[in-house]
Amino acid sequence: STWGVLLSYCSIATRLQADRATALYRTSCLPISVFTPVLTHNTVLQYPVTMTSSSGSEHSPGGSRTAVILYRDREEWSDIEPRKQDDGPNPVVSIAYTEKFQDVYDYFRAVLHRDERSERALRLTADAANMNPANYTVWAFRRVILKHLECDLQNELRFIGDMITHHPKNYQVWFHRLKILEWIGEAPGELEFIASVLLLDSKNYHAWQHRQWVIKTFNLWDNELDFVSKLINEDIRNNSAWNQRYFVVSNTKDLGCFNVAAEEMYYALGKIGLAPNNESAWNYLRGVLQSRNLYSFPGLRDGIQELVDREVCSPFLQEFRIDVFEDELELSLENRDAVLDTAKRVLEHLANTLDTIRGKYWNYRYRRIVSRYGGTDI
Amino acid sequence: MNVKDIKLGENLPERLLLDQHIDFIQKYSSKENEYEYTMTEYLRMSGVYWCVTVMELMGALDKMDRSAIIEFVKSCQTAGGAFRPCTGHDPHLLSTLSAIQILITFDAVDEMDQESCVNHIASLQREDGSFTGDRWGEVDTRFTFCAVAALSLLRRLDAIDLERTVAFVMASGNFDGGFGVRPGSETHAGQVYCALGTLGLLGRLGLVDSDRLGWWLCERQLPSGGLNGRPEKLPDVCYSWWVLASLKILNRLHWISKPKLKKYILACQDSETGGFSDRPGDMPDPFHTLFGIAGLSLLGYEKPQLGSVNPIYCMSAVCLMKAGINIPKFKTSS
């Protein structure tokens, strides 16, 4: 899990410039809490842990280890005056930076200010992004440079793919990849790439969203139902996969057509039979039948009754029975009292025994069904 | 029944450690947290909004440097009207909303250029009613909420096409009754909040099946008492806000077990440093501190009493009233 903080002791190799010919290396050990709040959906913060190796060099995308030579010590950057962070006339806070971070970002601010769209600036944005992949402005400026230099976008795809593998829950890297694909105009191998990220976390919201964009934009629907079915087989409770199934079915078939709805109903019932307390499957079942009367839809009552006969223990099953009872009461005048009585008992059981944490909700459903269908003067 | 959840351990905080949280927020921007503070520069404006709002709810806003913060906010407004999260960073709708929220809280909204800001926000609306965050074109119902909330705080909802705004929100509605980032995206509690906040501000909650969505929301409560953001995920204290505020907007807050949620939220406090974390034992931060406190406020926590929080804006109700913002009424009983 990427939640939580890893306290790591990093040794940072710092090159002292006492003598350019003979550089001395000093290592300092600092405890650094290496958590990076990342802005995700609705400002939900997640904490991808950025590992720095104990020898002090950052692992950069592409596999090579870059030695930590500060930008201020690099010959090829000697023409640039680094730009310190300006917090305005009255800085809200006093900030001290770690030396390496400060160095990279001082130079980044300089090239940003100069609007320098060069090769070396491009490499600098890679360093800056590596250190703080959630920094939106770094990615935005990188795109400006890429456009200006007319860079090889396949290269960039490889670069951003590597970044995503290291920071899969970061908004900016996924959006950057989307823009590159937009510029390229095609996305061969993209579904395979996303599948590889989903292997790391099958519920990664960014990955699924990106996948939907790719499928819609490049019309890659053909194999998606198979892919989704495979994922549901691997983890029957994967809500993202169930959502994807609805996405595919609703875009490639017509749920208004009886056969389509029936097929999806049987699919959902089959999975419910395997894991009866799986919220995703029940939501899906209700979803594919949403505009229909549950009582009269062929095969549904039998499927539900089978679960009841098996004495399956599941609040979702009981809730669904209520939905069916309500549709029955909606339709027919026969057995009203009996149906209502059964429904009331189920709801009491839910409130008092089976799902007490939501007791107030079940009591509401009780009052609702009584007020809608319980009047003696019909 | 096997449910993905955490187990609340022993010896977790059971009462509100208010003074420690005040202390935590004050210290957050100080030298002790340099690295994290630096790394989060790109969301500084939102960070300030979280700190300012939670301090106000805790009755300690006077401990924040009002004039310095206002200067900072003003310095982040661009000529185009939008706000940067911090100097040197690109402006964005997210930081624009946070900036306005900060200024309203400090009763200083006249110190910004409202006209250019309104025009900028309006320019971000697309044909289908959605909003992008900036010129790069990312679309998200979060940005819809940011745009509508920002414009309503500036009393300029007239600047955008409201019908299309609503149409896009409803198009992002899903088969389970919830809402996602865009049409087709998985329902997520945070996006539900953004959708309901938007519809609430525009008086269109009637479009929502409140019973169905209210049920999805109260199903977020796990045996530990905490709330998750979608099925089969772990609880997180920030969902005490997204889910709870959503239920409040739907007048169905009583559908979750208040005592169990309260216990979970209190357990997420860090008794050593102050502040709240996502779940017990993890590192605290201002984000989770705000939403833990705001959640407790919605639950009507007393001893000590917290400031009343508006469930749509996640801002102090008192500050909104002082600013003369007409907000939809919410039944106090739920």
Image (tube, coloured by chain):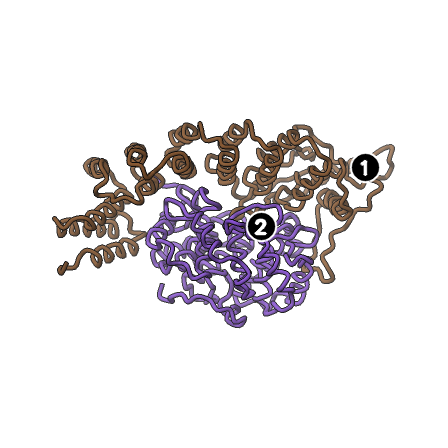
Chain colours: A brown, B purple
Q: Is residue A291 visible?
A: yes
Using the image, determine if residue B89 lies above or below residue B18.
above
Q: Is residue B12 visible?
A: no
Q: Is residue A105 left or right of residue B39?
A: right
Please name the residue shown 45% across and 31% down the image. Answer: A221
| Residue A110 picture location, percent across and down | 77, 46
| Residue A252 picture location, percent across and down | 40, 34
Please name the residue shown 77% across and 39% down the image. Answer: A70
Q: Chain of mark 2?
A: B
Q: Label 2 belongs to which residue?
A: B133
Name the quadrant of the C terminus of chain B.
bottom left
Q: Label 1 belongs to which residue?
A: A74
| Residue A230 picture location, percent across and down | 40, 28
Say which amino acid is labelled 2: Gly
Please name the residue shown 81% across and 39% down the image. Answer: A77
Residue B176 sits in quarter: top left
Distance in Å between CA atoms under marks 1 and 2: 37 Å
Q: Chain of mark 1?
A: A
Q: Is residue A273 left or right of residue B33?
A: left
Q: Secondary structure at mark 1?
A: loop
Residue B234 sits in quarter: top left
Please name the residue shown 54% across and 56% down the image. Answer: B147
Using the image, determine if residue A340 lies above or below residue A165.
below
